[in-house]
């Protein structure tokens, strides 16, 4: 069932109870736990950390698949590109293309037409030869201009577009190890979230039973105070009747004053304990708790059947170290990937304008061209990569040693908690016997005092003994409950 739905039901129940009972609301341990989880695990930072780890893992997985990209570029130029000069000199003459687009050609003196013009100068053939020479020169100039224009590229608008695909074929295991690292990091984020929940639940249990303990101690202090008040009244009457001394009365009054202090201390302690529980549950600090105390005598976790070695793997500390160890191993392999060959396949389609499909053209009907190939990189001498690989191996060994050391410490910690739970259970049995005996002693002392067989001091000793025994029983019960919660936290079953 959805946790938010459960919390809504709990809050509705508490609200109805509040309307019926005024300012006092009755809370159970499961309700306090649920409120604390919603209050303590709703941290936006924790959610963001988990999402970041999730997307990093997905990104590492996506890096194994083809990467498709589209690139384009546009450029405007103020001048065109000319493969030929606007003036070219040949052995027979010089061809020139003017800025206005006109072309001309001048014969050199060593050319055939140059020598012929010089030979017929001043003769009747000078004019016909000159006309013919000019016509031939113009033809050459027009031909040069045609070639000049053909070798000119319109560079005013340049467009280049390319669609490319790249697919890693072999990277020495780099991509696989990067995915493993990202996955382990995501697991750590999840484990940390669960560990935070376990800590919250333990804090709730501890604060809850502390309130229960202080509440019961407050009741005991009130009962003890009532006994002394009654004793004080009885001694006053005895003094008036002459069967008790003023000293006896002063002793009782002094003891009753001490009971007043204990009662006040219990009341103040209950206020502080209530505030601590309210803070953990995310409730107003002024909340007045009335808690369900029925489970105080129930220890559901038997200390006789817990095996720390078998359960320690559930501990979040060890799980995080195991994931860290996986990261260290992957980091070592990642460093070793730098010594492995890398193979990358690529393919693409390129379109340009001007295009080169059939000569140089500025038309938009170019067909573009496809490219495909494989790139292979084989490292030969990479001393830095080798040293990084060795360093990563030693770093992984450090994490492995830390994991084993932590495992031993956690086994010891769990075993100690297991033993303390067994001791707490024995303390409860002894405290119950002691309290029962103290109650019987108090009953007999009260009867004897009423019969005038003992003094007020002896009765106060019996009352003090009863208060101490009852307080010890409450302490033993709360110690057992908190120890049980701590052991469950260690076992990952809280």
Image (spheres, helix red, strand yellow):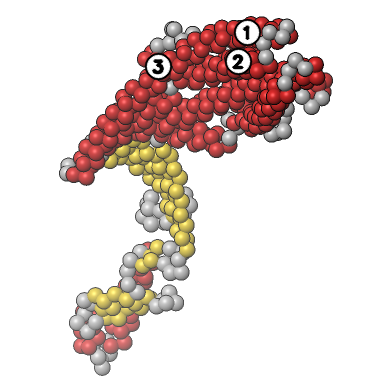
Q: Quadrant of residue 20?
A: top right
Please report contact status of discs 2 and 3: CB closer than 8 Å, yes or no: no
Mark 3 crowdedness (10 Å alpha carbons): few <14, some 14-19, many ≥20:
many
Residue 494 in sight: no
Dot label at residue 431:
none
Residue 299 falls left or right of residue 279: left
Of badges 1 and 3, the one in the foreground is 1
Q: What is the CA distance from the residue labelled 2 to the residue labelled 1?
A: 9 Å
Q: Earlier in the sequence, mark 2 or mark 1?
A: 1
User: Observer-nearest residue: 169 or 271?
Assistant: 271
Label 1 crowd (10 A; few <14 / some 14-19 / many >=20): some
Which residue is disc 1 drawn over?
A: 441
At mark 1, the secondary structure is helix
Where residue 422 sits: x, y (%)?
Answer: 46, 11
Q: Nearer the viewer, residue 223 or 178?
A: 223
**Residue beneath disc 3:** 415
100 in relation to 117, above or below:
above
Q: Which residue is mark 2?
A: 465
Q: Secondary structure at mark 2?
A: helix
Measure how far apart labels 2 and 3 are at the Cα level: 34 Å
């Amino acid at each position: 069932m959805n946790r938010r739905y459960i919390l809504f039901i709990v809050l509705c129940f508490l609200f109805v109870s509040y309307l019926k009972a005024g300012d006092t609301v009755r809370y159970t341990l499961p309700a306090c736990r649920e409120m604390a989880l919603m209050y303590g695990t709703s941290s936006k930072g924790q959610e963001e950390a988990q999402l970041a780890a999730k997307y990093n893992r997905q990104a590492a997985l996506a890096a194994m698949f083809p990467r498709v990209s589209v690139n384009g570029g546009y450029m405007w130029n103020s001048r065109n590109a000319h493969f030929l000069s606007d003036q070219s000199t040949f052995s027979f003459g010089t061809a020139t293309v003017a800025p206005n687009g006109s072309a001309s050609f001048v014969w050199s003196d060593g050319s055939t037409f140059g020598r012929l013009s010089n030979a017929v100068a001043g003769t009747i053939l000078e004019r016909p030869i000159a006309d013919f020479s000019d016509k031939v020169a113009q033809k050459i100039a027009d031909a040069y201009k045609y070639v000049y224009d053909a070798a000119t590229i319109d560079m005013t608008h340049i467009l280049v577009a390319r669609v490319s695909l790249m697919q890693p074929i072999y990277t020495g295991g780099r991509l696989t190890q990067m995915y493993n690292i990202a996955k382990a990091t995501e697991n750590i984020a999840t484990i940390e979230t669960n560990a935070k929940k376990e800590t919250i639940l333990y804090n709730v249990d501890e604060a809850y039973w502390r309130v229960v303990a202080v509440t019961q101690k407050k009741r005991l202090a009130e009962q003890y105070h009532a006994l002394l008040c009654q004793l004080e009244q009885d001694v006053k009457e005895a003094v008036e009747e002459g069967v008790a001394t003023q000293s006896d009365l002063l002793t009782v009054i002094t003891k009753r004053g001490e009971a007043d202090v204990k009662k006040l201390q219990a009341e103040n302690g209950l206020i502080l304990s209530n505030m601590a529980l309210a803070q953990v549950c995310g409730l107003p600090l002024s909340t007045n708790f009335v808690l369900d105390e029925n489970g105080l005598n129930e220890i559901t976790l038997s200390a006789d059947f817990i095996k720390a070695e078998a359960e320690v793997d559930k501990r979040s500390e060890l799980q995080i170290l195991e994931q860290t160890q996986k990261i260290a191993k992957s980091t070592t392999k990642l460093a070793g990937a730098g010594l492995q060959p890398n193979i990358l396949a690529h393919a693409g389609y390129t379109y340009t304008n001007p295009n080169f499909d059939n000569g140089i053209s500025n038309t938009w009907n170019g067909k573009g061209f496809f490219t495909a190939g494989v790139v292979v990189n084989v490292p030969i001498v990479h001393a830095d990569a080798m040293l990084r690989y060795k360093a990563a191996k030693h770093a992984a060994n450090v994490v492995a040693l830390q994991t084993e050391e932590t495992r031993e410490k956690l086994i010891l910690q769990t075993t100690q908690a297991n033993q303390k739970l067994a001791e707490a259970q024995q303390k409860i049995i002894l405290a119950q016997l002691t309290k029962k005996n103290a109650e019987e002693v108090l009953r007999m002392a009260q009867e004897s005092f009423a019969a005038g067989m003992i003094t007020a001091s002896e009765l106060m000793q019996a009352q003090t003994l009863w208060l101490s025994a009852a307080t010890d029983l409450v302490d033993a019960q709360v110690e057992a409950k908190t120890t049980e919660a701590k052991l469950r936290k260690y076992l990952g079953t809280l």
